[in-house]
Image: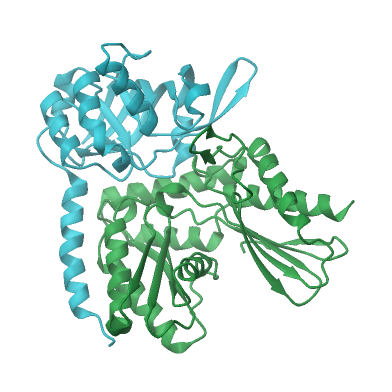
Chain colours: A green, B cyan
Amino acid sequence: MELEKIVEDTAVELLRIAATELNQAYVEEMTEALEGTEGAIGRAQLRNILENVRIAREQSLPMCQDTGIVAFMVKLGDGFPLRSGLKKILIRATRRATEEIPLRPNAVDMFKGNTGDNVGLNGHVPILYFDLVEGDRLELVAMPKGGGSTNVAAQRMLKPGLGLKGVKEFIVEAVAEAGSLGCPPYFVGVGIGGGEGMCMNLAKKALLRPFKVRNPDSNVAEMEGELLEKLNELGIGAMGLGEGPTALDLHIEMAARHPASLPVGVVLSCWALRHARATITSDGEVKIEENS
Amino acid sequence: MEHHLRTPVPEGEIRKLRMGDIVYLTGIVITARDEAHLKVLELHEMGERPPVDFEGAGIFHCGPIMKREGDVWRVVAAGPTTSARMEIFQDKFIEAFRPAIVIGKGGMGSRTAEACGEYGCVYGAFTGGAALLAARRIKRVREVYWLEELGMPECLWVLEVEDFGPMIVTIDTHGNNMTEDVRRRVSTRKDEILASLGGS
């Protein structure tokens, strides 16, 4: 089979896995949380989530009707034969996945209405993030993200004088403000530094770090632990009804900042943090990661 | 307390419900999100009637995934969307069309709560994202209106449901609003947390 077709088929499969199979580590965490939750309302929410996730996997159906705006994170090896053509392939895959899985059409043209196929406009959606890496492989991550939790993202250009304490305050405030709106329990991605746009990209990518794996920098790791604990003290609870966990995990990614700027981005994911990863060699060999 | 209600739900039944009660609904539930709310309210202002009667029924903040099989629409996934977006016109909607239950996730604010008390309506919180649980309780798609104009997520789907739930009553007709209660508690704790944060 041609490499183009292999990449397209893989991208469709990744969108299917992401939409229908929740990472087992998240399922286990929520199962544990259910055991530790006393209130009947919080327990009912977690039970419903877990039952829903089970049906989704069993029947290969989207776990949530909001199958999100489609994004792919691409790491393109120097020796991988496909270059700009990848964009067209990923757009084709998005159209096919919309039809085949099916995904809800979630791409809206403000003048003409819903495009119907999750694609539009001017090549901007699906959202594609490209990174150039060594080697001859292509790494592809599908990360569709729902509107509810996307709407409660927050970004602020803090005064550098507020320092790390100011950063922590902003993160706690952002999650408190999100409250019930983005389907908690949340996964929290934080990006610090870089610039006004980069902090948001870092925050979104932070969500993809494996579950409960802390930042390799011990200072950042400590801050992650502290914030995760504090966020759970907020008591938003499952679905914002005040019972059960508020946040399941929190990851921070950092970049250097301009001396005059302290950009902070907070990207939240609902309990349904959906993603799937594959690597494809130049020979067309595909390896889809289990529970990536 | 657990309640099993059937549409059209009489106002008296709705006024018996209390914040924290669990509700299951059988009968007619109609999906309506931002654009459908706008459109039916526009029609109402012009003195025209929308294509479907909301009185005593469930209004579902939901943009489902549907699949057409021959002449029949099948519900693939149909969980609730964030209701807060509808806060800007839900009160007018309740006043104009008198639904029995507004179904969604994330709760609603004081304007909606006031209209609920005044006109006899409650808010039922369905677990966000639990789209397949919801789909299982939908027995049939009776009608669809404005599909071409508004698209699949935004149009009006008229659904026949059986024991649709469990929903938690977070706004009742007696002035209670669980979402506001939690929000106030969270805000107090937030202030305590901010005061306790380390770092410089």
Residue at 42% of width from left, 88% of height from top? Answer: A219
Front position in the image: B53 or A52: B53
Q: Where is residue B176 shown, x and y percent of the image?
A: 13, 41
Q: Where is residue A30 shown, x and y percent of the image?
A: 43, 59
Residue at 44% of width from left, 23% of height from top? Answer: B157
Q: Is residue A117 left or right of residue A167?
A: right
The reply to whether residue B43 is in sight is yes
Residue at 25% of width from left, 55% of height from top? Answer: A242
Q: Is residue B102 left or right of residue A270?
A: left
Q: Where is residue B97 shown, x and y percent of the image?
A: 24, 19
Quadrant for residue A32, please give it: bottom left
Q: Is residue A251 left or right of residue A81?
A: left
- Count of numbered circles on the image: 0
Q: Where is residue A177 shown, x and y percent of the image?
A: 27, 59
Above or below A91: residue A98: above
Quarter of the image containing the C terminus of chain A? bottom right
Q: Is residue A104 left or right of residue A220?
A: right
The reply to whether residue B33 is in sight is no
Above or below A163: residue A145: above
Front position in the image: A111 or A14: A111
